Amino acid sequence: MNGSTPPASTPTATPTASAPASPSAPVDDEPAGDTAFASWPTATDEQPVSSTIEVKGVYDGSLKRFHGSGDLGGSGQDEGQDPMFELADGATLKNVILGSPAADGVHCSGSCTLVNVWWEDVGEDAASFKGKSASAAYVVDGGGARKADDKVFQHNGAGTLTVKNFQVSDFGKLYRSCGNCGTQYERHVVIDNVLVTSPGKVIAGVNSNYGDTATLSGVTIVGDGKKKIVVCERFKGNDSGDEPTALGSGPDGTSCLYETSEVTYQ
């Protein structure tokens, strides 16, 4: 970490045209195939980031590796860290590699789209979704995350998150609806065509007492012969900051919506 290193470009991102893709990894807006997953990409360049990059419109990172420096140079699990990227309502972030340290990853203040975004070493969280409207729609399409001590996707706000064509390995929870936020919402997640590689703890965690749902399909779990990874876990959330109470796991037709045939073990 080098506190004196300035960001390589201005921290405010305006709408940009799509940049040329690296030939080493596909960067199409629609990742190919229902069962095919892109290889982890090779970074085309490096960019240190010492203050949050604010994104409005479309930001195409051209598969550069962005890593924190200065005030964003931490890699711990402390709550309240600043993100590397802050996406305005309706913004799109694409073709980005977040290296280490990654601070608090990506924040979405409203609806947002993340396309072909890769986290090499998740810091506090890979991405947090904070829109306040029940109609907020967040989409993660393609990409992947590794080394998440706790959560990959943290859903603090309202609305629906869709995660598709995504791969994750060495993680705590792929998705968690906030269990003890001061303001609670009904939240929904749709997880489709994901490749999950052990070790990991939970794919989706939801608060059944707030009406949350997790809909899962096309889940492939690798290296978990004893089936220790929980596909969907239900909690009793609260707004007092207390640790939420675990209520159970598995499909229940109400909060955890999937058929066991949608989960394949390799």
Image: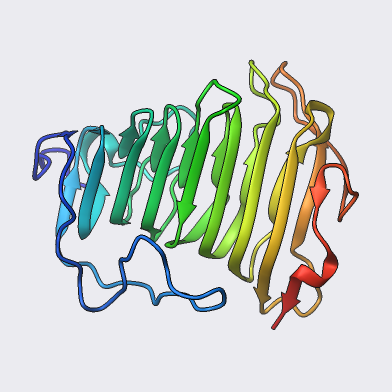
Quadrant of residue 154 within the rendered picture: top right
- Horizontally, residue 183 falls left or right of residue 256, namely left
Q: Nearer the viewer, residue 174 or 81?
A: 174
Question: Percent from the top left, x then y, of residue 254?
Answer: 87, 42
Question: Percent from the top left, x then y, of residue 110?
Answer: 44, 28
- Residue 247 vs 230, above or below: the answer is above
Residue found 50% across the figure and 34% down from its top: 129
- Horizontally, residue 146 falls left or right of residue 150, namely left
- Horizontally, residue 50 falls left or right of residue 179, namely left
Question: Percent from the top left, x then y, of residue 204?
Answer: 70, 50
Q: Nearer the viewer, residue 14 or 46?
A: 14
Residue 86 appears in the figure: yes
- Residue 36 vs 131, above or below: the answer is below
Q: Nearer the viewer, residue 197 or 94?
A: 94
Residue found 37% across the figure and 73% down from its top: 40
Residue found 36% across the figure and 31% down from its top: 82
- Horizontally, residue 50 falls left or right of residue 172, namely left
Question: How many numbered marks appear?
Answer: 0
Quadrant of residue 46 within the rendered picture: bottom left
Question: Percent from the top left, x then y, of residue 134?
Answer: 61, 25
Quarter occupied by the C terminus: bottom right
Residue 104 appears in the figure: no
Quadrant of residue 44 within the rendered picture: bottom left
Residue found 54% across the figure and 45% down from its top: 153
| Color style of the picture | rainbow
Q: Nearer the viewer, residue 221 or 31?
A: 31
